Amino acid sequence: MAGPGGDRGQAIQVGAILLFTILVIALAVQQAYLVPNQDRQVEFDHFTGVQNDMEHLRNTVMTAGQQGLTLPAGVTLGTRYPPRLLTVQPPGASGSLRTHTIGGAGDVIRLEHTSANVSKICGLGTLTTRTVTYTPQYNYLHSVANVTYENTVAYTTGRSGGRYVQTGQAIVSGTTIHLYPLVGPYNQSGSGTASMTLYGGVTGKNDSVRGPFSLLLPTRLSAGTWRNLTSGQSTVQSVPGSEAVNITFSGGKNYTLKCSPVGAGSPPGNTSTAGAKTNDVSPSFGSHVTLRHRRGPDPVRRSDRLGVDERTWYG
């Protein structure tokens, strides 16, 4: 029969075991729930920054093209998680920044039902354009797929395929049509900052294109999205069997057609041609780009754009 001292020893042992068990459970809860939630917030903050970076890239493309300048645009590809005591952290998140062709039968920008030659105005033999897409490789934030720039528009795509349009478009404005074809391959991945150099080419314009005519524009956005982006200024229809829309401009008006090719990572290789006049240069263009949210409710704060766990996408 154990004496009083033995009982106290057993109580101490039982207490130590209970304390150790509580500590193990607390660490398990932190590893399983608290750390993922905190790291998901880190990834969300990074993705919000990437949306900023892609809007800056969008503005830089237009500024370089309109002014004929060579300008850099940086996108932060990845992020690191803060060190934590007694818990395990996964490797830092990474990402990639790539240009992609817009495939299908309608991969060439062209004018229809008019004698105006858009390839001649742009100084490019084959007039195609590319997207620039950032694709993250996150460990916890699984609601987002990528952020894309194309045809003066920046937008976010969710895993479900819906798209959230971040900016307005600058191709159609009243009776002015201004194209910014993006030329050249670019591919960088990792966790650092991708610095894409954008080369503005020789720009041209045609002062008088008589309507009616239509513009076939390669795009991964829907015809409905382009209708909203152009605010009903023109008729927009999808092109069956291709990633393109057909934008029709009404008759009885004269339109100014401008073209500012931009090279991604290298000069676009376009040449000035007879009949293509020099573009008007606006030194303050980059600072006057207006960013507009066209689908769904207007966000009050940038952090409202994307929920950490889920959000409503507008397709």
Image (cartoon, rainbow, N blue to C red):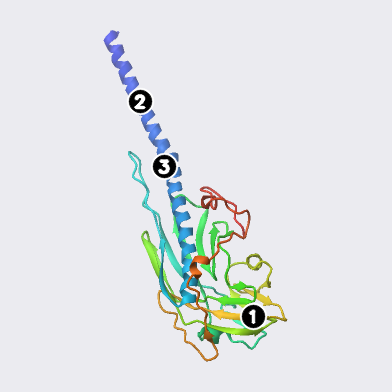
Extreme residue in the bottom direction: 274
Residue 19: mark in rendering? 2
Can the viewer see residue 218 in this picture? Answer: yes
Which mark is in front, 2 or 1? Answer: 1
Amino acid type at circle 1 is Tyr
Q: Give the spatial CA distance, label 2 vs label 3.
A: 22 Å
Residue 58 position, x and y percent, is: 49, 67
Q: Quadrant of the C terminus?
A: bottom right
Chain-order first, disc 2 or disc 3: 2
Residue 197 position, x and y percent, is: 40, 71
Q: Which residue is mark 3?
A: 35
Give the side of residue 114 with respect to residue 57, left or right: right
Residue 293 position, x and y percent, is: 59, 59
Residue depicted at 45% across the width and 58% down the height? 50
Chain-order first, disc 1 or disc 3: 3
Q: Give the spatial CA distance, label 1 vs label 3.
A: 57 Å
Within 10 Å of the Cα at label 1, are there few (<14), some (14-19), or many (20+) other Cα atoms?
many
Amino acid type at circle 3 is Val
Residue 255: mark in rendering? 1
